[in-house]
Amino acid sequence: MAERYIVVGGGLAGLMTVIKLAEAGKQVDVFSIVPVKRSHSVCAQGGINGAVNTKGEGDHPDIHLYDTIRGADFLVEQPPVKGMCYTAPAIIYLFDRMGVPFNRTSEGLLDFRRFGGTLHHRTAFSGASTGQQLLYALDEQVRRYESEGQVRKFEYWEYLSFVKDEQGACRGIVAVEMRNMEIQAFPADAVCLATGGPGIVYGRSTNSTINTGSANGRTYLDGAIYANAEFIQVHPTAIPGQDKHRLMSESARGEGGRVWVPRKKGDTRDPRSIPEAERWYFLEEKYPKYKNLVPRDVASREIVHVVRDLGMGVEGEEAVYLDVSHIPADVLDRKLGGIMEIYEKFVGVDPRHTPMKIFPAVHYSMGGLWVDYEADANNDMVKDSPRQQATNVPGLYAAGECDYAYHGANRLGANSLLSCIYAGMIAGPAMISYAKNAAPKKGDVPQGALQGAQKQWVARFESIYKMAGNENPYVIGRDMGELMQRVSTVVKHNRELDEGIQAIRGMKERWKNANVLDTGRTLNQSATYVNQLWNMLEIAELILAAGRKRDECRGSHYKPEFDLPQPKTKDPRQDPEWMEAWRKRNDNWLKFTMARWSPAGPQVSFEPIQSLSHPILKPEPRWYA
Amino acid sequence: MPPPILVRIERRDGPDAPKHWDEFSVPYTKNANVISVLMEVQRNPVTTAGKRVPPPVWDQACLEEVCGSCTMNVNGKVRQACSALIDRLEQPITLQPMKKFPLVRDLSVDRQKMFDALKRIRAWIPIDGTYDLGPGPRVAPEDQEINYVLSTCMTCGCCLEVCPQVSETTGFIGAAAISQARLYNNHPTGKMNASERLHALMLPGGVNDCGKAANCVKACPKGIPLTSSIAEMARETTAQALRDFLYRDERKGGSGPG
């Protein structure tokens, strides 16, 4: 039998992996719950980072690397981040060659804009729908391979689990065809999961409704290690909605947008009539260097503080102004058109003339499946090493938001499109190396293991179809989301996390009494949701349990009772007492949160960061003020 | 307290199953849209007649009008359900699946033919590998602006749904694919294979099947200038046909004497 490879997920990470495999002449099956062109990558708006240095600022991949590591508060293995930042310019050029309509300078070259957590113009962009444009480019390239017979697409198929052989290695997957509910097992020499993040565990977020995290949850249940689960990014600027919160890209601030509230509490005046002196630009005031472009965790905390602690939300609502009305409308249309339209369509107000009302919303998971890497003595990634992007399950890889590897405690804006593509670029060759050297004999996929796994899933779905209890699964899902929003977003407290864990366990009991609502065998979305919901509850419990264990503040994970005191000097490095406290904190907590599933709940341990023994950038206080 | 939201959904368990309507009533909320109403129905799938029914089935993903998934007929007009705000809709709101595509179930249809059309017109830049070959060609900001708009096509199918030339039995490729051919032909590298795409558009079901009803451009949620794209591709295919005739000896190729 010829070598076969499986990629699960058709977003940027998945399709990049597919292309790398197909380009090497391999046969690839790609599975996706939606036509791949509709994957969540389309929602990324602002751009993709790469230190191309076209603005005379002396930008360099090293500076990109340092910004990313600092943004992550050092909770990353540094070599993969180095690999990513050094490859970034070539990635942008590659997509340029694929025909992505990036914005241009007057002489037809790529234009770059600013984003959070950096002082450089480093972000290439295509209007304000860069993710959509990058995904379409890969979708087109994959369609080309599909028309040449090298790639088979399985769209409307949902991954259920990987197939394990007797040695515990991954030898394929089981998936359900959602339109006729048929369950099949597929053999593979190596499998890559590129199944995105778990935003829907939070109910309403900026994520697509397909981002359930179910594939990750199931894979963790089946023995994969999940790392840094507690690090969930809350994006500072989104439009609150009934069905989802819609992202207002950081690029709005990158292009000069300003965040403010009226200085007078409860001011009911039209924002346009409030004079400059009566507006409080609180980010600019507190962070004179980065101003509105502080990293996302910092901005979200400040906004929540202003609204909830100081009670200064605009018009008494949970909202602050994001103001681009001072920027000429034609510039806004050219550089931010997509998000101007979103605000107009969904709120009914023209943001070119009236400040937008926004509030932080759950956006991205820095944590995910733990993956390995291999680097040389210079901290350079070893080309084609089978260890790149490999989970702890032999033959199972992970890439994209579903891995934990690139963003540590906080992701910088416009680094996610980059990390998805880079991870896909190295995952493909790693899978080939694995199949060539380390894999069990090619083509010798044990039929027993495949059939056994398939039968097990048929039985599980048969039992789901029979669920006739009195709990509506969608109600359990809503309750889970509301709970997670309340106890595990911008500010966390141990007491609430403990209550949350108990509440999730209660929901698991309710799940057992769920009603499937629909017993049909055509596109039975309720049945697939019941299956997903269990996996989501597992991820929810893990996020809370990991957060409960980490008694410190780092990036997006903020527990005020464990915060370091304010330093006595403007530069914290000149306050020896503070530095001592900071060092002590790192000794205890600058470690990965590693979790394995057990029937009694997540088994969480803290493991050292390997590359800190010979780091590229030594840990230093993360200080943006 | 505003009255509850009334929604009527056209339902079918499959392409061969009988059609019926279910009506649901959900409590009014500010900023509700068709999706948030459908989500509320999922949490309590009981009709106004008091009958417990399976929750309605529909496609969705991004909910911000960039993925194209949730396209359906809302009050008889094809659009994305996510951006259909309740406060701007007449009630009872009627929801129906798109009619120009094979039905899967309830509001979900199979739009595979649109993706197949992209294959037919070779909608890609044939890059020579993903290796580091430096930057792509320079592009004038003016061309970028045109291409960006063309490239926001999310293959939602609104243009096909409103087109009198499109039906389950006719083979017209539709405005979306024709406009994508224009996009690639307007790119400095894509231009090199322009004739392949034009030849695809010259086949039966291609650009000449357009009946010039111009419904497509009005239905496009992204404001893509579809009629301009069709006009330009019609012109280009005519020019291509002429070139094919004039240079027919070159196209045959020839290995020369001997």
Image (cartoon, rainbow, N blue to C red):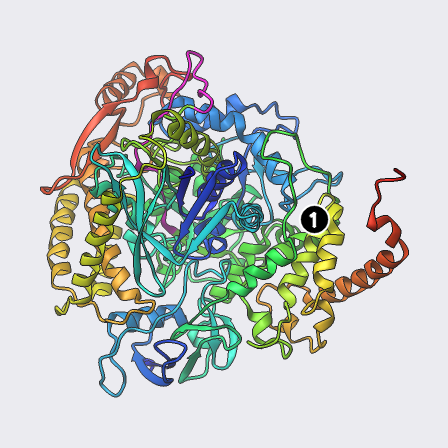
In the image as oriented, which residue stretches furthest toward the bottom? B49
The location of residue B140, given as percent across then percent down, is 75, 44
| Quadrant placement of the C terminus of chain A | top left
Q: Is residue A478 left or right of residue B238?
A: left
Residue A532 in view (yes/no): yes
The magenta stretch is A360-384
Left or right, A56 with respect to A83, comes to right
x and y, in percent, of residue A138 in the image: 54, 45
Rendered residue at 35%/18% (across/down): A611
Residue in view at x 31 percent, y 63 percent: A181
Q: Quadrant of residue B241?
A: bottom right
Amino acid at the residue labelled 1: Gln
Is the stretch drawn in magenta largely helix, strand or loop?
loop
Which secondary structure lies at badge 1? helix
Q: Which residue is mark 1?
A: B144
Q: Residue at x 20, y 66 (%)?
A: A465
Residue B135 at x, y percent in the picture:
67, 33
Q: Quadrant of the N terminus of chain A?
A: top left
Which chain hosts label 1?
Answer: B
Using the rendered view, name the quadrant where residue A222 is placed: top left
